[in-house]
Amino acid sequence: YIPSPSEHVRIRARVEEIEIAWSKCDREIQWLEEAADKLRRQKAYLERCAGEHKSLLSPIRLLPPEILSQIFEY
């Protein structure tokens, strides 16, 4: 099949539309990947904070320092 000159113009226009949409998808994917990276960093930070706070609630922290020093001396 050989497109006619008018079909050739329409096909070329359609290809340009597709390439523009393709480029838009690439930009949106890049933006989403950057947003996902930011959320991953935020999640890691929150996990560290939660761990640090949980360690403050550890039962060993309820022991008086004198008892702890005796345990470690033993």
Image: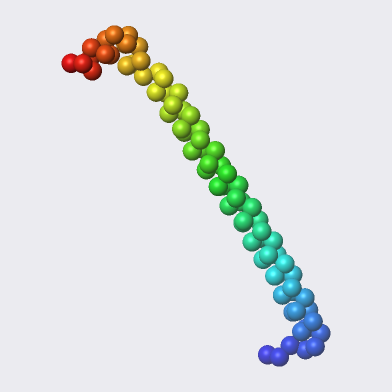
Give the quadrant of residue 6: bottom right
Q: Please give left or right for residue 58 compared with residue 25 in the image.
A: left
In this rendering, the count of numbered labels is 0
The residue most toward the bottom is 2
Q: In the image, what residue occupies the spot 48% across and 29% down?
A: 49
The residue most toward the left is 74
Question: Looking at the picture, does residue 71 appear above or below residue 16?
Answer: above
- Image spot of residue 31 (x, y percent): 64, 52
Q: Please give left or right for residue 18 compared with residue 10 in the image.
A: left
In which quadrant of the rendered image does the N terminus lie?
Answer: bottom right
Q: In the image, what residue occupies the spot 61% across and 56% down?
A: 29
Q: Please give left or right for residue 5 compared with residue 22 in the image.
A: right
The residue most toward the front is 73
- Image spot of residue 14 (x, y percent): 74, 74
Nearer to me, 7 or 54: 54
Give the quadrant of residue 4: bottom right
- Image spot of residue 63 (x, y percent): 32, 11
Q: In the image, what residue occupies the spot 51% across and 35% down?
A: 45
**Which color scheme does this rendered protein use?**
rainbow
- Image spot of residue 53 (x, y percent): 45, 23
Nearer to me, 17 or 41: 41
Question: Looking at the picture, does residue 10 appear above or below residue 46?
Answer: below
Q: In the image, what residue occupies the spot 77% across and 75% down?
A: 13
Nearer to me, 10 or 63: 63
In which quadrant of the rendered image does the C terminus lie?
Answer: top left
